[in-house]
Image (spheres, rainbow, N blue to C red):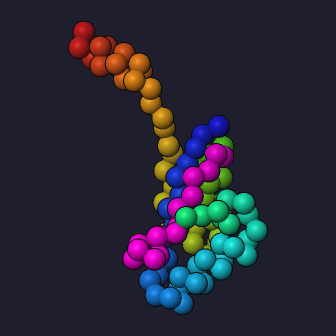
Amino acid sequence: MPRFFIEVPHAPGTRDCNMAIAAFLRTGSHFLTHADWGCKDGEHKAWLVVDVGNKEEARSIVPADFRSKAKITRLTTFKLEEIEAALRAHQA
């Protein structure tokens, strides 16, 4: 199953942070209740890594008020053997 990195920005400020965090926690979604937050380091974003079928499915996990600003990135893991084979193919 594909893996996606979801980055959800929100406005800075204590009230805005608390509102964003509360919106995630209220959903009860396992994904959202386990989000990582950067607010205490001045990075006003939440991050999640999820295994779902496609980008649309990943976006649908995000609370509606934050979906339009969420950045969804499909993640790929590479093995050294794959890259070495690809490099050899390009050298030929």
Residue at the far top: name it.
92
Compared across the picture, whether 48 is left or right of 60 comes to left
Locate residue 18: give its quadrant.
bottom right
Residue at (58, 79) in percent of width and height: 20
Residue at (46, 77) in percent of width and height: 40
Whether residue 47 is in magenta: the answer is yes
Residue 61 in picture, x, y percent from top left:
66, 61
Quadrant of image for the N terminus: top right
Residue 62 in picture, x, y percent from top left:
63, 65
Quadrant of image for the C terminus: top left
Compared across the picture, whether 79 is left or right of 47 comes to left
Residue at the far bottom: name it.
15
Residue at (53, 86) in percent of width and height: 16
60 and 33: which is toward the camera: 33
Residue 56 appears in the picture as rendered: no
Whether residue 19 is in magenta: the answer is no
Residue at (53, 62) in percent of width and height: 47
**Magenta stretch in the rendered image:** 37-52
Residue 27 vertical placement versus 91 (above, below): below
